[in-house]
Image: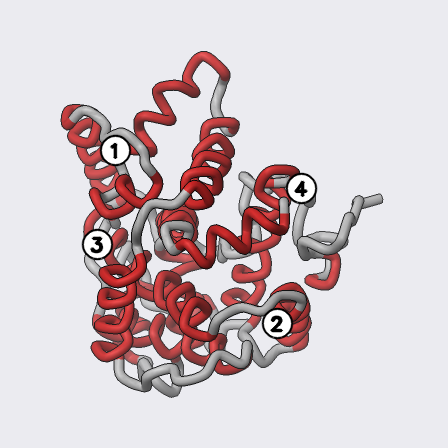
Amino acid sequence: MLLTDRNSVPRGRYGWLRRIEQLDPVADHQEIHRITAGFEFPWDYTRSLEFALFRTYCVPTISALLRKTGEFEKRPQKRYDDTALLMAELVEHGYDSARGRESLRVVNRMHGKYDIDNADMLYVLTTFIYEPLDWIDRYGWRRLHPHERLAAFHFYRGVGLRMGIREIPDDFQELHRFKMDYERDHFRYTDDNHAIGTYTRDLFCSWFPRPLRPLVGVGVNAMLDPMMLSAFGFRSAPGWIRSVADASLAGRAKVLLLFPRRATSRSTREPGNRTYPGYPVGYRPSDLGADSDYRHG
């Protein structure tokens, strides 16, 4: 829950930004991050986190474990929805709220079944911080305020600590250096990477009408950098497709400038969620998770 009443937020398209400027990026990081992800950039955060997770599958130890579970092959949409909604619960309610603690218990239970290297866990955490920041600075309708960047760092650092991830740097730049070094040292092609990357790309394509899916697949490749393409063994897309994608996203940002500030958070109200219809109405975070087979009603 926001610490301030919406009615106290300055009016106008930049009202939330002016509120963010009044807040402390350390003490108020949960409120700032909820504003950024739920009110200002909900679509951008969803898209950027999709590619953030995609990026983690370039690490062979991560993709090997995911392939072993079979979740990506059997139930890719459910696994996607579980991850997206559990993270959204933390953003919407805070990681120390009742729903936040319940979400973290689900996440920790899912991870606790496997022997996961701490460095891999730390790397995944970094993608949740830095990939959205890069995406929004490139495609968002405004640039991020420094308070928003620091708030994202402190928010996910708090989540990581509650997940039992060790050796999380307490400095924004130090953790970013870890991310860049980890990718340089660990990204390489394996058959597991290719399989998990293909399942994920196919999932993205499945959200569109069948005639459009081949083009969507090429479009996904166009959004991947050369390191990711190499690690997945995917072919690079024609340059013009990336240009069209960039122009489309830039055009979207200009249109959004004409919209009023959002009055309702979209964090947990993701229309793309296909596993839990109507979420969050009638659901608890404990209904989520790869080891559950929840059916509403």
Helix, strand or loop at mark 4: loop
User: Left or right: 35 with respect to 83?
Assistant: left
Q: Earlier in the sequence, mark 3 or mark 1?
A: 3
- 49 and 110: which is toward the camera: 110
Q: Between disc 4 and disc 2, whose residue precedes? A: 2
Could you tell which of marks 2 and 1 lies nearer the N-terminus? 2
Of the two numbered discs 4 and 3 in the rendering, the one whose residue sits closer to the viewer: 4
Q: Quadrant of residue 14?
A: bottom left
Amino acid at circle 4: Thr
Give the labeled residue for mark 2: 104
Q: For the residues carrying marks 3 and 2, which lies nearer the camera in this image? A: 2
Residue drawn where x is 26% and y is 63% of the image:
185
Q: Position of residue 245 (x, y in %)?
A: 24, 31
From the viewer's perspective, is the residue at label 1 or at label 4 nearer? 1
| Label 3 with label 2: CB-CB less than 8 Å | no
Q: Earlier in the sequence, mark 4 or mark 3?
A: 3
- The residue labelled by disc 1 is 222
Measure the alpha-carbon separation of dots 3 and 2: 31 Å
- Tell me the residue that label 3 is attached to: 142
Q: In the depicted view, which residue is nearer to us: 15 or 281?
A: 281
SS for tag 3? loop
Q: Which mark is residue 275?
A: 4
